[in-house]
Amino acid sequence: MIQVAGRPRALLDVPMHYCPGCTHGIIHRLVAEAIDKFGIRERTIGVACVGCSVLAYDYFDVDFQQAAHGRAPAVATGIKRVLPDRVVFTYQGDGDLASIGAAEILHAAVRGERITVIFVNNGLYGMTGGQMAPTTLPGMKTTTTPGGRDVRVHGGPLRITEMLATLDGVAYAAREAVTSPARIHRARRAVEAAFRAQIEDRGLGIVELLSTCPVNWGLNPVDAIAWCEAHMVPAYPLGVMKDLPGRADAPKEMPRETAHANA
Amino acid sequence: MTRLLMKGNEALAEAAIRAGCRAYFGYPITPQNEVGEYMSHRLPEAHGVFLQAESEVAAINMVYGAAGAGVRVMTSTSSPGFSLMTEGLSYIIASRLPCLVVNVMRGGPGLGNIAPSQADYFQVTRAPGHGDAHGVVLAPSTVQEMVDMVGLAFTLAERYRLPAMIAADGILGQMMEPVTLPDPIEPPSPPAWATTGAVGGRHLISSIYLQPEELEAHVLGLMATYDEIRANEQRWEDYRTDDADLIVVAFGTVARIARSAVDRVRAEGLRAGLLRPITLWPFPTDAFARTPRRWLAVEMNSGMMVEDVRLATGGRAPVESYGRVGGVVPTLVEIAGIIQTIAAREGVPV
């Protein structure tokens, strides 16, 4: 008998604390599958963020460091720089990565840190009870935007992965959703590609995954999936934004002759 | 052993490399920039990692990551930058990670100025981070001590699995003195708890304990270590205190000036001495068992260490306080004058 499906080796067989209908569980599985696929479980170090996935280390059978809010890319930088032959990934929510940790992810990307970033976007702060995040959609009601997000007051949604994709240090950037088997299949390929960018020493790899938060969205799990498709996907276009074959930050030839000519 | 004329900041950086430090993460801020600049060329030569971070916030979190990976790691900063590092320091303390954080203090509050100061005394000794957070604090008073304390700091940090801090000031960072550098040592192997890969079991570096009883047990463990440090690591220097009626208490740069002031008033027949705390945390409480007629705390701040002096002396003798703030350094004549004034007020000898 050939086993065609099962629990990934890198995922521990323990109950998860996530709310019913939350898609963290799916995304955890995709990450664990990628770790298995590349055979890197014993040389991978994960960095957990602050938010619902703060306890992610309870679910992966790999080494982990738990970082301060938003600082996971800096912590990952510290690990990767002193252990360059290990595989280091961060697992961050949208409040963590796009708000309080905007500087840390931006500069990790600028430096082309050889890390993989799993960025889970559900459009609000889940763990603290559903407050507005930079990713909250216009008009979306949260506990701090009871009348809906007013872009004249709070600005509009931050599409940070597009921003990061413009940076030379980023080798791979993509956004996918985990709202259907087909989408999950695409997301799996994106997560693998984000790890491959690191393993092949090409640069920083980031995957943004549109996720659901049924509890804070005030929807049941099925309706939350539909809401994500109807509202999140149009606001956050899916697809691969960048996938460089070679090193993202390969030294560019200095225009020496031009410089001499001008001197 | 090599004897060289070196600037305090550079001597400290070289001493760190010789003590096995193999990673430095920092952000520019005066008056400690020479530490990072020196590391930027010397650490790669020693097969170490130098990285200029985007902020002190990022730098201290890089230190967290590298310390968790089991590497001897340090950062350096000055007062406003230390404020930013206190977030990460709390996590480092809570996660029991050894590292070295150097604070070359400057005038505050706010942006203040780049002149020497000791006004972060409370911050480094009372609250280097939120929560029940402490780390060893060493206060050098010479460039040689800047060198000697680096190796000690790493030793203590690793012995107790807590960060060690060196609280210097702008004078110590900037001035040049002859120093004897220690012979280089090889960095130690990563400890068993380090996140180097889940071979034979996984490793976790974390500071979250959701159940109050669990967190209490964790903090009680920290407190037991704090008690151990208080019992074992108090360091101070006595100078002409044996027969002293008045003992000046001063650390760092001020202690050097106070030492000369003691000599000056001694020449006039006043029995004064100097007690120099070398560890600011733990405060050398044991040194205050004696009871002179008067204590005088002199600091470059609004009067911070004097609170520890009062706690340590328990009201057994009067404690006076003198401080200059804003980056102003008290002079020898000034400190001698304070001693003379007290002596005149209280009647000779003191």
Image: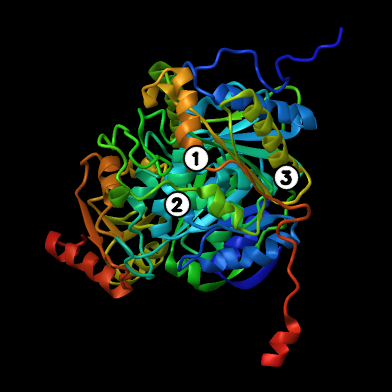
Judging depth in this view, the residue of A47 and B346 nearest the camera is A47
Q: Residue at x 72, y 79 (%)?
A: A255
Give the chain of mark 2.
B
Number of other residues with Cα within 10 Å of mark 1, as a class: few under 14, some 14 to 19, many 20 or more: few
As shown in the figure, which amino acid type bears the numbered disc 2? Answer: Ile
As shown in the figure, which amino acid type bears the numbered disc 1? Answer: Pro
Helix, strand or loop status at disc 3: helix
- Residue B83 position in % (x across, y down): 39, 52
| Residue A31, visible in the rendered structure | yes
CA distance separating discs 1 and 3: 29 Å
Q: How many marks?
A: 3
User: Does label 3 lie on the same chain as label 1?
Assistant: yes
| Residue B93, visible in the rendered structure | no
* Residue contact at pointers 2 and 1, CB within 8 angstroms: no
* Residue contact at pointers 1 and 3, CB within 8 angstroms: no
Q: Residue at x 54, y 66 (%)?
A: B9
Which of the labelled discs sits on residue A234, or is there none? 1
Which of the labelled discs sits on residue B278, or is there none? 2
Question: Would residue B318 appear left or right of B127 to someone viewing this image?
Answer: left
Residue B303: name its quadrant.
bottom left
Q: Hey, which residue is sitting farthest top in the picture? A: A1
